[in-house]
Amino acid sequence: MRKGFTLVELLVVIIVLPFVMLVLDGLFSTLIRDIPRSYRVMQENTSLLSMLKQMQQDIDKAKGLPESFDEYTTSNKLLLIELTEGMICYQLKDDKVLRHKLTDNQRKNALEKTVWSVPHAKVEWQVWRKDRGGYAVEIQTHIEHKVGGNWEKKMANSHLYFVGAF
């Protein structure tokens, strides 16, 4: 008996092999590209949720949402929250959200700063006002990632926090 493969065995391998390679290509594509991208989205979403939790705590304890304080004025890049122990400022700057206390002593101010890095996140807030007094903050967030040449929005959320809701 001769050792070797029959023509039928070789044809089966030649026909089946491309289908196996297509399945493996999809698996490797997922492992190499999609899983790391999903991990980054989740990390950034965790950072956003941490920032939103701190904002909610500050707004729940707030006395008000003033339009201005010293040289600071509320805008779509700056949010002022008046607490009993002082003024808190949230600022969108260079793919980061900064939270710091506004005090007369600028050295102390630098020590009481919290920074959340959100390079692919979009954060927008709007203060709801009645009779020139702010009573709520609406915050919209989402994460943008480029997939196949197109930008996709992930983890899109809208939050509404009322002053003194505690």
Image: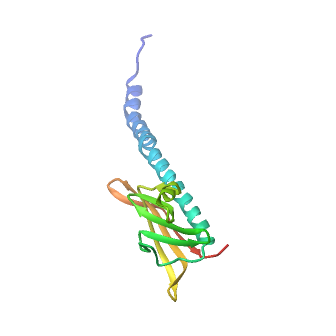
Is 4 displayed left or right of 80 in the figure? left
In the displayed structure, would residue 105 be above or below residue 165?
above
- Front in this rendered view, residue 60 or 121: 60
In the picture provided, is 150 more to the left or to the right than 140? left
Q: Residue at x 56, y 58 (%)?
A: 50
Image position, residue 148 (x, y; %): 34, 53
Seen as rendered, the residue at the extreme front is 105
Q: Residue at x 42, y 11 (%)?
A: 2
Give the percent coordinates (x, y) of residue 120. 41, 56
Name the quarter where the N terminus is drawn.
top left
Q: What residue appears at the point 34 percent right and 58 percent down from the top-left corner?
A: 150
Q: Nearer the viewer, residue 14 or 129?
A: 129
Q: Nearer the viewer, residue 73 or 17?
A: 73
Residue most toward the left?
Answer: 149
Taking the view exactly as shown, the residue that stands out farthest to the top is 1
Dividing the picture into quarters, in which one does residue 13 lie?
Answer: top left
Give the quarter of the figure containing the C terminus: bottom right
Residue 103 image position (x, y, % from top left): 51, 65
Is 127 drawn above or below residue 140 in the view shown? Answer: below
- The part of the image, by quadrant, that contains residue 149 is bottom left
Report the residue that reaches farthest toward the bottom.
131
Residue 71 image point, x, y percent:
41, 72
| Between 117 and 40, the one nearer to me in the picture | 117
